Image: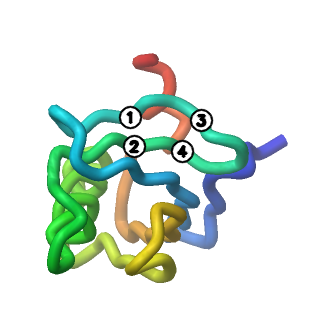
Amino acid sequence: MQPDWYRRDGEAITLTLHVHPGAKHSEIVGLHGEALKIKLAAPPIEGRANAALLKFIAELFGVPLRNAELRQGGQSRHKVVRVTGSKVAPESLLAEK
């Protein structure tokens, strides 16, 4: 059974995230309900946290920044991000925890 925090659709992966901005450093914390919890070092001011989140996700999945797209939750802690063209399995992000 596939976890609730991500969905695969062809070569795209849609992630459900719970984001905590303003942390000391950016990291994956684990699961928060049906979402992957991420602490972000960027403050939630003028879209900086969203930009930092997309950069962090692109690096985790080994794709260019243009392949990470914020689909929902621009003003919320609950966000949906779509990643295309990655060979990284989403489960591996939790394996390090």
Dot 4 corresponds to which residue?
A: 36
Dot 2 corresponds to which residue?
A: 38
Residue at the image position 17 percent from the left and 45 percent from the top: 41
Q: Quadrant of the C terminus?
A: top left
Q: Quadrant of the N terminus?
A: top right
Q: Would you say the residues marked 1 and 4 are in contact, meaning their CB atoms lie under 8 Å apart?
A: yes
Residue 21 horizontal/vertical position (percent):
29, 52
In the displayed structure image, the side of residue 6 where residue 61 appears, left or right: left
Dot 1 corresponds to which residue?
A: 28
Is 2 located above or below residue 76 in the figure? Answer: above
Dot 3 corresponds to which residue?
A: 31
* Distance Cα–Cα, label 1 vs label 4: 8 Å
Residue 50, which numbered label? none
| Secondary structure category for the residue under label 3 | strand
Identity of the amino acid at label 1? Ile
| Secondary structure category for the residue under label 4 | strand
In the displayed structure image, the side of residue 24 where residue 69 appears, left or right: right
Residue 19 horizontal/vertical position (percent):
42, 53
